[in-house]
Image: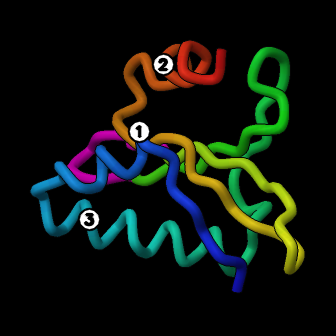
């Protein structure tokens, strides 16, 4: 399995997350991403190179945005941000600039 690094927005989001069921779903999603890094949807255009993975909880769509990069030992997954789908990709665009 590939190692994961969290950028500040993702780290902050997961630290503040109180809903234990949602937290477990995120953990399961991150395990799936670690097993198969290309399981998400590859974005195009302004977000080229960024992958998105959906997490559903209580009829709400949450997202995990990540990209793949190489470190000394091979590949590495970097989680950029996580949160509800509303304005999610616009927030990523602002953060990436």
Mark closer to the chain start, 2 or 1: 1
Query: Helix or strand or loop: what does disc 2 sit on?
Result: helix
Depth check: give the residue in front, 20 or 94. 94
Looking at the image, which residue is at 84% across and 17% down?
A: 45
| Residues at circles 2 and 1 in contact by the CB criterion of under 8 Å | yes
As displayed, is residue 80 above or below residue 79?
A: above
Which SS class for mark 3? helix
Question: Are discs 1 and 3 less than 8 Å apart at CB?
Answer: no
Task: Report the residue at 55% width, 13% height from top.
Answer: 94
Write the residue at 83% across / 26% down. 44
Q: Residue furthest bottom?
A: 1
Query: Tag 3: Cα neighbours inside 10 Å, few (<14), some, or many (≥20)?
Result: some
Taking the image as shown, residue 87 lies to the left or right of residue 16, namely: right
Tell me which corner region of the image, top left, top right, bottom left or bottom right, holds residue 76.
bottom right
Categorize mark 2 by other alpha carbons within 10 Å: few (<14), some (14-19), many (20+): few
Quick one: label 1, few (<14), some, or many (20+) residues within 10 Å?
A: some
Residue 73 is situated, as x and y percent measured from the top left of the image, at 86, 80
Q: Is residue 19 above or below residue 84?
A: below
Identify whether 76 is placed above or below 59.
below
Q: CA distance from mark 2 to mark 3?
A: 21 Å
Q: Which residue is mark 2?
A: 91
- Reading the image, the residue beneath label 1 is 9
Name the residue at the left extreme.
18
Q: Quadrant of the N terminus?
A: bottom right
Residue 45 vertical placement versus 51 (above, below): above
**21 left or right of 70?**
left
Mark 1, secondary structure of its residue: helix
Residue closest to the eye, 71 or 53? 71
Residue at image mark 3: 23
Position of residue 20 measured from the top left corner of the image (x, y, whole percent): 14, 67
Task: Give, as a single range, the part of the protein colored magenta.
Answer: 56-63
Query: Could you say which quadrant of the image residue 8 lies in?
Result: top left
């Amino acid at each position: 399995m590939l190692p994961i690094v969290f950028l500040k927005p993702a780290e902050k989001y997961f630290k503040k997350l109180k809903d234990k069921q949602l937290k477990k779903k995120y953990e399961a999603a991150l395990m799936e991403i670690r097993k198969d890094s290309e399981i998400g949807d590859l974005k195009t255009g302004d977000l080229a190179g960024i992958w998105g993975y959906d997490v559903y909880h209580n009829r709400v769509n949450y997202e995990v945005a990540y990209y793949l990069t190489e470190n000394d030992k091979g590949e590495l997954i970097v989680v950029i941000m996580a949160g509800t789908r509303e304005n999610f990709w616009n927030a990523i665009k602002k953060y990436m600039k």
